[in-house]
Amino acid sequence: MDEIHVLIVDDEVEFASTLAERMELRGLTAKTTNCGQDALASVNREPPDVVLLDLKMPDIGGLEVLDAIKNTDPTIEVIMLTGHGCTVSGIEGMEHGAFDYLMKPVDLKMLLGKIQQAYDQRMNGHHGERNE
Amino acid sequence: MDTTGNAMSNSVESALREQLLLTHGRLLSGFSHDLKNHVAIINESKGLLQDYIEMGKICDPELCSRLQDILSKMDKRTDSIAIMTHHLNSFAHRFDTASTTFDLNELIVEQLFFLQRSVRLKQLNLSTEIPKTASNITSNPSLIQYLFLHLFDTLLTSSQEDDRLHIAIMQQHKQMEIRLVVHRKTTLPSATKEPLLTPEIQLCLQKIGAHITYKELDTTSSQTAITLPLEI
């Protein structure tokens, strides 16, 4: 896998840090933030290739963060992570420009595959196109 | 209280019940959302330990093997919890709207998941025939749940150990049909097997344009079916 810079945004600190450690073990560069405000600051400071974004956070909602990231740099691909049983919120995220959405708990292999696809899309400049 | 007063009181009571249901749904969905987060953290921690074993970072082979055993037991349990919380969360969201488009197969699979325990305790054999492709309908999911549970409960009450229950979903013309078939080991009087159409069930049927039919297939088998329009 290329050296992909991933930003994990999740208010569950342990979830974000453990996932980041697993990604680092596989050669990715992973950073974590635990709220929407910090995520936006991090994106501005050091734009990642792919953002893993939790839909529900205490300060700013995931969809709002997604919009702000896309306004800052539309080439950054965002994968929404949702704990909700219904797929409506994930589909809504894709309508806002998310690359895809995954339900928690997530299968790491599947997640890594999605991250690679999102990264390829960013590199090929096809951002904003719906993932099939 | 006069008639108008009574009617108003009934309508307030019914609105109150609806609000209670919505509140319970919201609480349940928040609760199951939290459960999912806990499972996700356990899964990732487990995965990290697995990574360390696979990458040879734990040198003692005996310890590695023991840890693998423990991890595999944890895997089985967390997989089950993940499925349970997924169904619980979907179930909680069924109260969200009075009319929505959803996959009927998914709704019945979810219901059967919750009913597994009752089936197991009663020592019945349950089989299903549910299409692999989505059976989308536009209706009130919580009312369909209620109907299905009512009929399933009737079957459970009238069944005995080793009876066979079969649940099938099929599209018939422009309607969906949920069939509940029971093959009993002994014959029972019809009155104990037929579904009871209480005023609440009748109101429910009316609200979603559904019908219930009951027929005896032979002396020991019977079929109850719910017919639903594809759209209300």
Image: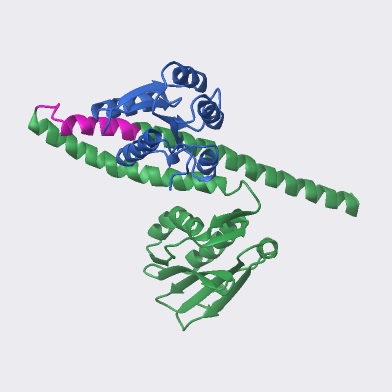
Chain colours: A blue, B green
On screen, residue B119 versus residue B53, left or right, reads right
Above or below, A5 relative to A41: below
Where residue A63 sits in the image (x, y, percent)?
55, 32
Where residue A86 sits in the image (x, y, percent)?
51, 45
Where residue A51 sits in the image (x, y, percent)?
42, 29
On screen, residue B2 versus residue B137, left or right, reads right
Q: Main secondary structure of the magenta part?
A: helix
User: Which is nearer the eye, B191 or B209?
Assistant: B209
Q: Residue farthest to the bottom? A: B218
**Which span of residues is magenta-colored?**
B42-59
Confirm whether the magenta stretch covers residue B111.
Answer: no
The part of the image, by quadrant, that contains residue A89 is top right
User: Which is nearer the eye, A117 or B20?
Assistant: A117
Above or below, B222 relative to A37: below
Which residue is painted at 70% across and 65% down in the image? B206
Where residue B11 sits in the image (x, y, percent)?
79, 50
Tally of numbered discs: 0
Q: Which quarter of the rendered picture does the N terminus of chain A lie within?
A: top left
On screen, residue B46 versus residue A39, left or right, reads left
Which residue is painted at 63% across and 45% down in the image? B21
On screen, residue B16 versus residue A94, left or right, reads right
User: Which is nearer the eye, A107 or B160?
Assistant: A107
Confirm whether the magenta stretch covers residue B55.
Answer: yes
Above or below, A106 relative to A53: below
Which residue is painted at 53% across and 36% down in the image? B30
Above or below, B6 relative to A56: below
